[in-house]
Image (spheres, coloured by chain):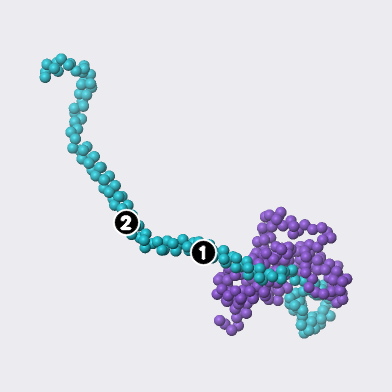
Amino acid sequence: MPDHLDPDAALMLRVKQGDRDAFEALVEKYKQPVMNLAFRTLRDASEAEDLAQHVFLQVYKSAHRYEVSAKFSTWIFTIARNLCLNEIRRRTRHPADSLDATSTEDDQPLIQVEDRKHFSAPAAVLHRELELKIEEAIGGLPEKQRIALLMCREDELSYEDMAKVLGCSLSATKSLIHRARETLKEVLKPYLRTGVWREAENS
Amino acid sequence: MNESLYQELREISWRRKLTPEEETRLQGWLAAHGDKQAEWELEQSLSEQLRHLSDAPLSSNFASQVMQTLDAELARQEREGHGRHGWLQWLHKLAPRLAPVSLALVVAITAFVHYRKSDHQNRIINSVALVTSSDVPGPEILKDFDAIEKLPPTDEDLLAALQ
């Protein structure tokens, strides 16, 4: 085993040999990033959690195919991205299945996001409102742009890794992120310009 | 610093906050390109907002749920595997006992098929021999066939007198 082996790859080698503890360690480490991607792609917490579970089951079942040369984070995000796209395609074929996830009233939040930061009451309300606007704007992006933008938040992935996950060139990946950001800037311009976010953060 | 370096710093800022050194270089460039200042502020504001997005809600027992589902899946696969392997094991145990019976059956079937085949051949040979050995009249006898056919019925009295 090479000295410079990625710690996750080392865990995966143990998973290949049937080590459940190693698998559990990987689940613990990647559950939140995978869930974030699934949740913001599918926009339904329950479905996203089911999908995230499938991602990890797929990781375990496909462990024998894992090549040490591949970065684990790239591999797992590729699985997550493929399952997300499959789910979106399934929804397109059977639109009635996902009515619950999309039908909302104007005054109802599209999604429920746990607020883990502590804000004072008005700041928390403001923060919540802003976050919902961003979530809505991200939800409105084309799938590939959305996935590219969300992966951009993951420290584990470099631009090159993201390109591998998305199956496109480095420049195409950056272009996807650029276009996603341009759309978000356009949609969120009133909030971005007023700096209301920063006020909420600082209060 | 040129436009491409600005672009590079912009792409870095999509992923993380710029280091103080990078920030200084950028500010120096922006001072000379006032038209880019507003664009940069917008970029930064968006990056901040994206960085501060909350994590998606996740069950506190997510990992244990995954492990449970995995266990159930593995148990199911094992059961299915046992089903297939159990049948094979049963066959493997019976094989020594079944072997002589199977051999006898194969020999019997082969003998029967051979018998049927030779019997069929004998029948054909006998039929050919019968046809060739029988006294078939020549074609010249048939030339009077019509005349014989027109003869009146047999005269019983004449036949009796001749006898």
Q: Is residue B159 above or below residue B47?
A: above
Q: For this view, does A124 lie left or right of residue B162?
A: right
Q: Farthest residue to the top: give it.
A: B157
Q: Quadrant of the N terminus of chain B?
A: bottom right
Q: Secondary structure at mark 1?
A: helix
Residue B13, position in %: x, y?
76, 76
Task: State the residue position of label 2.
Answer: B104
Kindly identify which residue carries mark 1.
B81
- Look at 25% across and 42% down and name the residue there: B123
Residue A26 spot, x, y in % from top left:
64, 74
Q: Is residue A105 left or right of residue A160?
A: right
Q: Is residue A16 visible?
A: no
**Residue A66 — which label?**
none
Q: Is residue B102 visible?
A: yes
Asked where in the image residue A20 lies, by quadrant, the reply is: bottom right
Compared with A97, B69 (above or below) is: below
Label 1 to label 2, Cα distance in Å? 34 Å
Which residue is located at x 77 percent, y 80 percent?
A: B18
Rendered residue at 79%/82% (across/down): B23
Rendering coords of residue B91 (x, y %): 42, 61
Chain B appears in which tint?
Answer: cyan
Chain in purple in the render: A
- The type of residue carrying mark 2 is Ala
- Residue A191, percent from left and from top: 85, 69
Query: Total number of numbered labels?
Result: 2
In the figure, B15 relative to A190: above or below? below
Residue A30, above or below A91: below
Question: Neighbour class for label 1 at 10 Å: few (<14), some, many (≥20)?
Answer: few
Badge 1 sits on which subunit? B
SS state under label 2: helix
